[in-house]
Image (cartoon, rainbow, N blue to C red):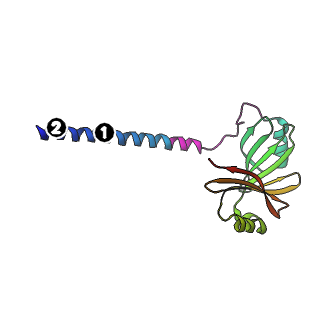
């Protein structure tokens, strides 16, 4: 009798483990499916319910003749166009009347001007870079970098491509 109870408990434990494994497997499958859809190729349709104005489309075509549009994102303040040109992904920002406000691109730290890169290495060696981009607009070129530690997040921008200034300092919770 005692052996039969042990076998019954062992069978219940095995069923519980199998159910647990199935739950993990199904959860993993759903997570993988969700990630797959999140990285699917974006459409060229507007990303919001607002339509891209004709002025913005015409201005974009004029400024970036051979570009391939990846995504349009219309907000109340501007339209952001994500596009590919010369094997680079770029982001252009337009006002509602089609005026080009700025163009940005993500870059690597080794693409910074030498003095800016050396300044980061010298003064912020305890931080890691989580975001770095170049922005061109109003006949100016500058860089923004996000640096983080376990406790702090700094957003910095370049001044005249010579030095960094703190644009935003955020304490992590």
Q: Is residue 50 magenta?
A: yes
Q: Nearer the viewer, residue 121 or 59?
A: 121
Disc 2 is placed on an element classified as helix
At a point 76% along the width and 42% down the height, the residue shown is: 80
- Of the residues under marks 2 and 1, which one precedes in the sequence? 2
Relative side of 5 to 153, left or right: left
Relative side of 162 to 36, left or right: right
62 w.r.t. 112: above or below: above
Provide the residue span drawn in magenta: 32-51
Q: Is residue 105 magenta?
A: no
* Main secondary structure along the magenta-highlighted residues: loop
Q: Which residue is mark 2?
A: 5
Q: Nearer the viewer, residue 57 or 121?
A: 121
Percent of width and height locating residue 43? 67, 40
Q: Residue furthest right?
A: 139
Q: Which residue is mark 1?
A: 16
Percent of width and height locating residue 68? 73, 48
Q: Nearer the viewer, residue 113 or 164?
A: 164
Percent of width and height locating residue 30? 48, 39
Residue 137 showing in the rendered view:
yes
At a point 72% along the width and 51% down the height, the residue shown is: 169
């Amino acid at each position: 009798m005692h052996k039969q109870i042990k076998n019954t408990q062992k069978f219940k434990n095995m069923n519980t483990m199998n159910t647990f494994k199935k739950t993990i497997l199904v959860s993993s499958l759903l997570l993988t499916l969700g990630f797959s859809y999140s990285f699917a190729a974006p459409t060229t349709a507007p990303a919001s319910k607002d339509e891209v104005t004709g002025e913005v489309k015409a201005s974009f075509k004029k400024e970036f003749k051979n570009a391939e549009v990846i995504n349009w994102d219309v907000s109340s303040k501007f339209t952001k166009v994500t596009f590919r040109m010369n094997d680079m992904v770029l982001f252009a920002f337009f006002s509602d009347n089609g005026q080009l406000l700025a163009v940005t691109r993500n870059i690597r730290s080794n693409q910074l001007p030498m003095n800016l890169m050396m300044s980061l290495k010298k003064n912020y060696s305890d931080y890691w870079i989580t975001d770095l981009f170049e922005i061109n607009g109003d006949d100016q070129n500058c860089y923004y970098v996000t640096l983080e530690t376990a406790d702090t997040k700094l957003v910095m921008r370049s001044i005249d491509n010579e030095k960094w200034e703190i644009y935003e300092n955020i304490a992590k919770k």
